[in-house]
Amino acid sequence: YFGWAGLGLLALAYEHLGVSGREATRVLTALTITSALTFVAFLHGGYAPPGMAVSTLALIVWAVAVRVGWRAAREATGLESRFLRAGLAYVVLALAGAVARVVLLASGKGTPFHGQLAVFVFLHAFAWFFLFTTMAVLIAHARERGARVDERALGASLRVLAVTAWLGAPLGVAGGDTGMMGAVARSAALAVSVAGLVWVRALWRMSRELHGTTATAFRWLSLWYALKVVMEAAGALGLATWAARARQPALLYLHVMLVGFVSLGLLVPLLSRLGRPLARGLALHNGGLLLMASGLGLLGAGAGGLSWAATWLPHGYRLAALGAVLLVLAGVRWLLPTSAWRMQSAGSHARPHSSSGTGRVSLHGTASVQAVCRPSAESGWHEA
């Protein structure tokens, strides 16, 4: 997921901030390589020594990526840039959590709870990098299409979230909602939920001023974020430890947030830049996630001891599996080139040429396509 959402969102962030040339290319290439190595290492052995070594290398690359982005972000103005700065700051928090985990392992000090908490601080903070950056690219995409953005409300929500979001990390660990730390975490999660409602309303309002598939996508984004807010509030009100121990509710939360909001939010501007129609996989993506969420919900209810749900457990597994298949099919449909793209590639007027001094590849007679690994400062957020 870091190689998909992390790389894609960082490339779009660099584009907006005007980070281009060899520096951007090297950072994005290094992230591509370390993401692939991390996937292979963790697929083979999880948190075994090879996985830890590759993860350490990836953290170093991310630290460099943040440094490069922050230099440009300091001088940038506008609501989108403020969201991007918050996202980069949360990567620093995530790296601090990862370092704390390494220190605990090396020193042999601390309890298993402290080790789990350090891991979840890393995951929780990185998740907020995804969320802040996704919201930034969605705001920019809506502006390009003439939609009005409620800057005052979104700016206020950003201030609340930047201060409080990291404090909710203990709720991801069983037992993290007890004591003074738990009280602070629950209060922070409630504040995050209230601020999240501002995002839900803003996305829905933007959808009303957009058209076609883009409007539909923004409505789905608003609905997925609303579901994320509801589950976050439920955790703050006493269900956090149950969700962490039962696993399925936590998996449901992660899928809604990372597949429903972040992945779809990244796909909206990304497919536009690549010239791929969003409509090809939109119904499959959201329908698949609905089925998967229903299945995980049934599994969570059964694991939570609800007698009526116990008999539905086999159906929960089937629904989750079917939903996963539909999500894969959505990805395949988005990846496959359209007939128009194939015709252009085969024609004599579709030979690409690179514009001098930029990172974009132009197609004769068509829109230019932004090179993924070399975001151009000139293009800003404008659709390629």
Image: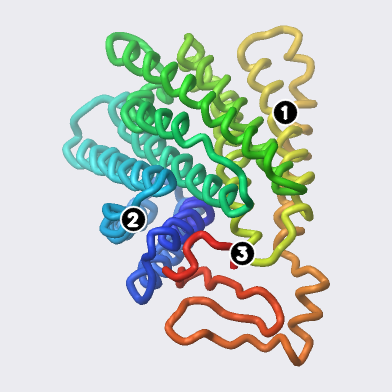
Relative image position of residue 311 (x, y in whole percent): 78, 15
Nearer to the camera, 85 or 336: 85
What distance separates the C-alpha of mark 2 from that of mark 1? Answer: 35 Å
Quadrant into which the C terminus falls: bottom right
Task: Find residue 378 and report its image quarter.
Answer: bottom left
Residue tagged by mark 3?
Answer: 273
Kind of residue sitting beneath label 3: Arg
Nearer to the camera, 72 or 263: 72
Q: Residue at x 54, y 39 (%)?
A: 149
The disc label shown at residue 62, or none: 2
Relative image position of residue 332 (x, y in whole percent): 73, 59
Q: Residue at x 54, y 24 (%)?
A: 197
Mark 3 and mark 1 lie on one chain; the one further toward the N terminus is 3
Mark 3 and mark 2 in contact? Answer it, CB < 8 Å: no
What distance separates the C-alpha of mark 3 from that of mark 2? Answer: 25 Å
What distance separates the C-alpha of mark 3 from that of mark 1? Answer: 34 Å
Q: Is residue 196 above or below residue 2?
A: above
Relative placement, left or right, of 13 versus 276 is left
Disc number lying in front (3 or 2):
3
- How many labels, in total? 3
The disc label shown at residue 295, or none: 1
Nearer to the camera, 149 or 218: 149
